Amino acid sequence: MNKNYKDTLLMPQTNFEMRANLTIKEPQLQKYWQDQKIYQQLINKNKKSTKTFILHDGPPYANGDLHLGHALNKILKDIIVRYYNSSNYYAPYIAGWDTHGLPIETAVTNSGINRKTIAVSDFRKQCQKYAELQVANQINQFKTLGLLTDFEDHYVTYDKKYESEQIKVFAKMVEKN
């Protein structure tokens, strides 16, 4: 009695593959979302909604690869924004990066540039160049997390328009003591 017990099981039949093949399928899915402009479709669907939800996201520093803290922060915020979008709120999610400050200056200094031997303007240019590379790197890494946003429409704090708006806000604060 050499019975194959596998043949006695009543298992459902499916067309799903037995292997996930995420290394192949994830990039295809992300490309599909990008090609079909899924984020833009969702935002346009809710654009005329009377309900608005804006998540003011503190941007990460553009100073290196993503870590678990970035993932946790962005994924939780992504879940919240997706919830509001699926609840017919107009809830855009604009990605941004903090491209100023000590973390970026430290990373540039650690790359071998001695800030004391070059002009301040040259050091700032080096910091901006480094930040630009890191923003591009982090965009690619955030895409692998499946965040629902338009990475082409993002902001960086070294943008002159962004800086001028910050100065206007600061001026209002000074006026109000």
Image (cartoon, rainbow, N blue to C red):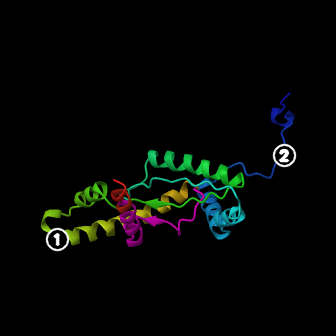
- Give the answer, above or below, for where 128 lies relative to 65: below
Residue 43, disc = none
Residue 149 position (above or below residue 82)? below
Categorize mark 2 by other alpha carbons within 10 Å: few (<14), some (14-19), many (20+). few
Name the kind of residue labelled 2 in the image.
Answer: Gln
| Direction from residue 129 to residue 75 in the image, left or right | right
Q: What is the total number of numbered labels drawn onto the structure image?
A: 2
Q: Residue at x 44, y 55 (%)?
A: 59
Look at 58% across and 61% down and name the residue there: 149
**Does the segment drawn in magenta span residue 158?**
yes
User: Height in image: 140 above or below 35?
Assistant: above
The reply, left or right, for residue 51 in relation to residue 8 is left
Point out which mark residue 119 bears. 1
Q: Which residue is mark 2?
A: 13
Q: Left or right: where does residue 103 sit relative to residue 169? A: left
Query: The residue tagged with tag 2: helix, strand or loop?
Result: loop
Whether residue 177 is visible, yes or no, is yes
Residue in the image at 26% along x and 59% along y: 105
Answer left or right for 34 relative to 130: right
Disc nearer the start of the sequence (2/1) = 2
Res. 85 image quadrant: bottom right
Q: Amino acid at mark 1?
A: Ala
- Give the distance between the C-alpha atoms of the residues marked 2 and 1, in whole angstroms: 69 Å
Along the line of sight, which residue is nearer the eye, 9 or 89? 89
Which segment did they paint magenta? 147-170
Secondary structure under the numbered disc 1 in the rendered image: loop
Residue found at the very far top of the displayed protein: 1
Q: Measured from the top left, where is residue 106 in percent x and y?
A: 25, 56
